[in-house]
Every structure is written in C-alpha cells, then in structure tokens.
Amino acid sequence: MTDLKDIKPKWVLVNENLYEISKFSHLPPQKRPHAICPVCRRPVILKLGEYNAHHYAHSSEDICTTAILKQHCT
Ligand SMILES: [Zn+2]
C-alpha cells in the first residue's frame, strides 16, 4: 500500500515514468505529453498556469485519492 501522504498532485506518469509536472510548463498545451495519474491511472489535465501553483486535474467524474487530498489542502 502506497503512503498517500507522499503523493502530491504534481507528479504524473508519462510513458510509465514519474515526472514533476513543472517539467512540462515551458511547453504549449498542445505539445504537452499525455499524462496519467499515478494513483488511479486515469488521464489527467496538466494545469501549468503562471499564477496558480502547478497541479493536475482529473475529469470531473473521476474519483481519486489525489483529488480528495487536494480538497483537504485548499
Ligand atoms: Zn487519480
């Protein structure tokens, strides 16, 4: 069982490797890789705006522990 406290919603799986999403912030949205949530392994949308902290978002219907964690943190 993975310790969920160690999983922050700023790490994604790309081609089965774990990357910090800030690594992709210099890329225009259409060039960003297809990222997958390391917890639920569903596709996620990278949010790499200038003003908010970099994070990723699930589709609204996805229930995932990282989404729950984020709600607790904000
Ligand atoms: Zn997830």
Image: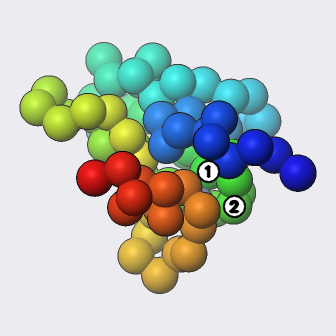
Q: Quadrant of ligand 1?
A: bottom right
The quadrant in which residue 11 appears is top right
The type of residue carrying mark 2 is: Cys
Can I make out residue 30 in this image?
no
Direction bottom: furthest residue: 61
Direction left: furthest residue: 51
Queried on whether the Cβ of the residue with tag 1 lies below 8 angstroms from ligand 1, the answer reads yes
Q: Position of residue 21 (x, y in %)?
A: 46, 29
Tell me if residue 55 comes above or below residue 19 in the rendering. below
Residue at 40% x, 33% y: name it.
31
Residue 29 - label: none
Q: Position of residue 59 (x, y in %)?
A: 44, 70
Residue at 88% x, 51% y: name it.
1
Q: Which residue corresponds to mark 1?
A: 37
Tell me if residue 10 comes above or below residue 23 in the rendering. below
Q: Position of residue 24 (x, y in %)?
A: 42, 23
Give the colour scheme shown.
rainbow
Residue at 40% x, 76% y: name it.
60
Queried on whether the Cβ of the residue with tag 2 lies below 8 angstroms from ligand 1, the answer reads yes
Say whether marks 2 and 1 touch (CB < 8 Å). Answer: yes
Residue at 69% x, 53% y: name it.
39
Q: Which residue corresponds to mark 2?
A: 40
Q: CA gap, disc 2 to disc 1? A: 6 Å
The quadrant in which residue 14 appears is top right
